Image (tube, rainbow, N blue to C red):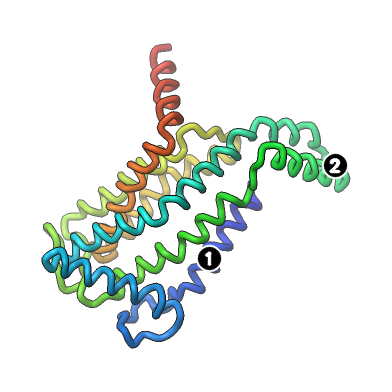
Amino acid sequence: MKKRIFLLIGLVFVIALLSGCTEINQPITSESEGFWNEYIVYPLSLFIIKVAEFAGGSYGLSIIIVTIIIRLVILPLMIKQTRSSKAMQAIQPEMQKLREKYSSKDQKTQQKLQQETMALFQKHGVNPLAGCFPLVIQMPILIGFYHAITRTREIANHNFLWFDLGSPDPIYLLPLIAGVTTFIQQKMMMAGTQHTGQMAAQMKMMLYLMPIMIVIFAINFPAALSLYWVVGNIFMIVQTYFIKGPDLKAAAAGNAGGAKK
């Protein structure tokens, strides 16, 4: 599990680096050069502008619409990632038995553990890296949209509801909503999963740490990004509810049963 986490972090870091994060402060235009700018960021920026024109010049409404469209486009990848995670979770008891059976740290025993683990994956048709690949595909799209929002000059010159899109939310309401929806979305994603020991502690820490980080970032970043996070989180909450419905109901029933006791 630790190797998968480090691999995932490494992949995300490489993608972020290749995605041109060093250009975050440079406005995106039709003259911007480079594969990343020409084929990902600028098309998304132009898409936001065109949707805003269709939406009566409202860039806030455009961000909402484009966010939903992008989330719908990558929805199949999210479903595949969730199903892969559920499949891995389902065989965790058997994997734990193998770890206990081959608990010795000598090389021969560890090789036997790896062989038995791979046989277990093949038996259940589980690919341990299948949950990572959809995320790897999604990341350039989401990072590209992030760039499009921050680097499109037209967005910074418009307002939406009570805030200016190019400035932080003056009453901090949007950052708070972003943090709360992040917490809810993570809580729903964790429903039906079982972790023990150090992994359980790490998951619990991330459950509270991530929303706090989002709030801190959103307080200092342009409100357009906060709006993007809020809409994306709400979409993910609805998506998770339909994808993980049985798990959520089981978790709720378990909590209710525990409360009655």
The amino acid sitting under disc 2 is Thr
Query: Is 37 placed above or below 118 here?
Result: below
**Residue located 69% across and 35% down the image:** 95
* Residue 33 pos. (x, y %): 40, 86
- Residue in the foreground of this view, choosing between 8 and 81: 81
The mark found on residue 236 in the picture is: none
Query: Is 91 placed above or below 165 here?
Result: above
The mark found on residue 109 in the picture is: 2
Secondary structure category for the residue under label 1: helix
Residue 178 as seen in the image, left or right of residue 127: left
**Residue located 28% across and 74% down the image:** 46
Query: Is 27 placed above or below 241 here?
Result: below
Q: Can you say which quadrant of the picture contains the C terminus?
A: top left
Badge 1 is on which residue? 13
* Residue 222 pos. (x, y %): 25, 66
* Residue 241 pos. (x, y %): 37, 37
